[in-house]
Image (cartoon, rainbow, N blue to C red):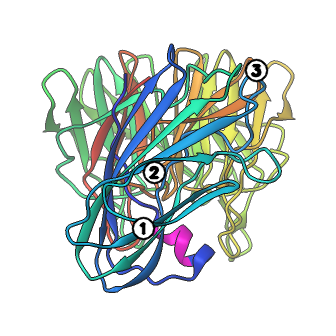
Amino acid sequence: MSRIARTVDRALWLLALGVLLVGLAGCNAGSHDAAGGTVSLDVQVIWPQAATQAVRVSAPILPETAPANVAKMNATVTVGAFSTSQSFTASAGTGSIANVPPGAGSLTLDALDASGTKLYTGTNTYTGTANQTATVTVSMAAAPGQTVPAWVLSGTWATKAPMPTSRTAVEAVAVGGLVYVMGGTLDFSTSFVAVEIYNPATDTWSTGPSMLSGNQQGGAVTTGGKIYVCSGSSIQILDLATSAWSVGTATPSPSAGYGASADIITGIVYVAGGGDCTSGTCVESKFLRAYDTVAKTWSKKADMPTARIQPAAVAYNGLLYVIGGALAAGGTSLAVAEVYDPATNAWKSLASMPTSRTALAAAVINKIIYVVGGNATSVIAYDPAANTWTNMTPMSKGRYAPAAAVVNGVMYVVGGGTTNATVTTNESFTP
C-alpha cells in the first residue's frame, strides 16, 4: 500500500483546454493493491472561481501505452459531496458521464481511448460558484483476464526538514550518510557559495565550509574522501578530512560554460553537455570531458550524439547515462536518453523518456534510475536491463533544477524552483 501527495497540473490544461484557472489546488492519496488488481486515487479539488471549468485530475498512474499484460483497464469514478449543490462531469477514454450530482456513487468508465492505448487521465468539468470543494475518487481495475503491474503507484514520498537556504540549480552528493548541498542561485545571475549538510538520521541541517566561488548548474561527485563540484570550465574540491576547499585543474578549452552535469566512474569524473560559450554566444554542446582525480588531468572523450544543456548524468554499472536536457536557443526540452561506455569511448541511444524535460535530477536505487524535476511532479524510472521507462508515484511539488542524492536506498530531492520562486523543499522517495 502506498500514499502520495500530488498537485493538479494547471499549466497542461491552460494549454490543452484554454481554460483560465486562477488558483486550482488539489491533494490526494493513492493506493495500490497488486493482488486485487486495482489502483485508486482520491483527489480533493477546490474550484476558486464561479465558472464552468475543465479540470484534469493530474494522475499519470499508468503509462501512456498499456504494458503487454494490461490489455484493458476499467475506471470507476465516485464523486463526493460538494460544499453546495453543484454538477460534475467525468470522462475517461471512450466513456463519459454527464451532470453527476453530489454523492452519486460509482460510475464505471472505459479507461482506454479509441486507439486502445491511453489509459485513464480523468477530465472533470464543474459548474458552480466559487470556492467549492469535492472529493473525486478514481479506482482502476483490470478487465477480466488482465492484471495490474506491481509497479503501478510504486514508491512513497515524505516531506523532510526544509533546506535553510532557498535556491535552485543546486548540486548535491551523499557522503557518509549525509547529503551535501552546494551552490545554486536565486535568479541565475548570482551564485551561492553556501554549503549545507542534511542528516537523514536526525532530519536536521548544519552548515558546511563555503566554496571558494559561487557555483550553479553543475554537478557534484565524491571519491577518495573528497567532493568534486564541476561547473563547465572549473572544478572545486572539498577535502572532507580538513574541511578545506581547493581549485582543481581548469577544464581545457573549448569547454561547457554552464548547465553541464557530472558523475564519476572508477575515479574519473565525467562532465557532459552544457553551454558552449567560446563564440561569445552560448549554444548547447555535445562535450564530454573526463577529469582523472589521481593524475589531476582532463581529457576529451567522444562527443554525445545529442547536444544539450541542463541534462541529468548518472553513473551505473560502469556506464554513464545522460538524460534529457534542452536546446540553449529557445530552451526546447528534450526526451532523449543516451549512454556512454568508457571502455569503448562510444555512445548508444536509449529509449526516450515518456515526456521531455530539462533541469532535472537523477539517481540510482537498486539497479533502477529515477528521474525527477524539470518543473514536473511526475517521477519516472528507467530500467537499464529492459531499456524501458515507468511512471512512479509523483512528487508533491514540481520543481525546476533540484538536486538528488541517495542515502541507504532513499532518494532525497532538495531545492529547485517553481514558476515564480525558488524553494527550500526537501522530500524523500523510497521505492
Query: Few, some or many C-alpha atoms within 10 Å of disc 1 (few <14, some 14-19, many ≥20)?
Result: many
Residue at 59% across / 16% down in the picture?
367
Three-letter amino acid code of the residue under disc 1: Phe
Query: Few, some or many C-alpha atoms within 10 Å of disc 3 (few <14, some 14-19, many ≥20)?
Result: few
Q: Which quarter of the figure has residue 30?
A: top left
**Label 2 to label 1: alpha-carbon separation:** 26 Å
Labelled disc at residue 377: 2
Q: Residue 350: x, y in percent?
A: 80, 35
Labelled disc at residue 386: 3
| Front residue (pair 21, 366) | 21
| Front residue (pair 134, 420) | 134
Secondary structure under tag 2 reads loop
Dots 2, 1 in contact, CB < 8 A? no
Labelled disc at residue 45: none
Magenta residues span: 10-14
Name which of mark 3 and mark 2 comes first in the sequence: 2
User: Is residue 268 in view from this perspective?
Assistant: no
Q: Residue 430: x, y in percent?
A: 38, 24
Is residue 209 placed above or below 221 in the rendered structure? below
* Quadrant including the C terminus: top left
Which residue bears the numbered disc 1? Answer: 88
| In-image side of 140 versus 236 (left or right) | right
Please tell me whether mark 3 or mark 1 is closer to you in this view. 1
Q: Residue 189: x, y in percent?
A: 41, 73
| Front residue (pair 65, 390) | 65
**Label 3 to label 1: alpha-carbon separation:** 42 Å
Residue at 20% across / 67% down in the picture?
83
